[in-house]
Image (spheres, coloured by chain):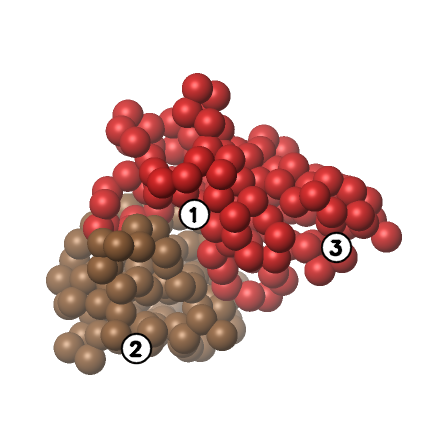
Amino acid sequence: DSGVTQTPKHLITATGQRVTLRCSPRSGDLSVYWYQQSLDQGLQFLIQYYNGEERAKGNILERFSAQQFPDLHSELNLSSLELGDSALYFCASSATSGRFPGELFFGEGSRLTVL
Amino acid sequence: AQSVTQLGSHVSVSEGALVLLRCNYSSSVPPYLFWYVQYPNQGLQLLLKYTSAATLVKGINGFEAEFKKSETSFHLTKPSAHMSDAAEYFCAVSTNFGNEKLTFGTGTRLTIIP
C-alpha cells in the first residue's frame, strides 16, 4: 500500500461526458502528479501540483483540467470525452523534500472507459 | 529535454536465469535515473534509483542497476529470476533536483518461464 488513494477505481461513461477523478496523496506529501497510461502512448505526464499551485505541465489536453485543494487532495477533470481518452489515470505524490528526487508514490489508478 | 529508451518491450527468461532489462538515457545535464515496477492491476512501485552517488545501485527484491555514463545506460539486472518477478518494468529519468517530474520509458514486460 503506497498510501495514495484514488477514486473511482473503474469508470465507464459515454463520449461527450465529463468525469472527475480524485486523488488523496500520502500523508505529508505536498506534490501531486497525474499520469495517463494507455497502450499506444505509454505513461504520459499530465500535470503536477505543489501545495495547491500548478508546478509543471505535460501533455495535458485543453479538455482536461486539474486542481489541488487546501487539504492537498487533487482532482482531475476530463470533459468532452472521446474514445481515445480511455486509459488508466494514475495519481502519484511525493514529499518534494529535495533529498529524494524522483521518488513518487503511485496510487492504483482509475481506469476510464469511454464508450 | 531528457528521455529514456527501453530496448525490448517483452523479455522472457526461465526461472533461475539472469534477468537483464535494458535502458538508455538521453540528457543534457547529469540525470537521476529510476526503475519502477508495475504488477498486474497495481500502481507503479519504486525499485531503485541513481542519484549521482554510487554507480552500482541495489534495489528491492534482489534487483540492481549500474549507471554507465560512457554508454548512457542504466540496465536492470537480477542474478536469478523468480516467478514473482513477472511484471512490467519502467525506466525513468529526472533532471530537476527538487522537482520530481519523471519521464518514463515505454516499459518492458517480463515473463518468467517455469
Write down the chain letter for disc 3: B
Q: Secondary structure at mark 2?
A: loop
Residue in the picture at 47% in, 21% down: B71
Q: Which residue is depicted at the point 61% across and 57% down? A: B61
> Could you say which disc has been placed on residue B8 in the image?
none
The CA span between labels 2 and 1 is: 22 Å
Could you tell me the amino acid type at mark 3? His
Type of the residue with mark 2:
Ser
Q: Nearer the viewer, mark 2 or mark 1?
A: 1
Say which element carries label 1.
Answer: strand
Q: For chain B, give the colour.
A: red
Which chain shows up in brown? A
Residue B82: which disc?
Answer: 3
Is residue B82 placed above or below B9 in the rendered structure?
below
Q: Which residue is mark 2?
A: A27
Q: CA distance from mark 2 to mark 3?
A: 33 Å
Position of residue B100 in the picture relative to residue A115 (left or right) = left
Name the foreground residue: A50 vs A95: A95
Instruction: State the image quarter where residue A53 is shown.
Output: bottom left
Residue A52 at x, y = what percent? 15, 67
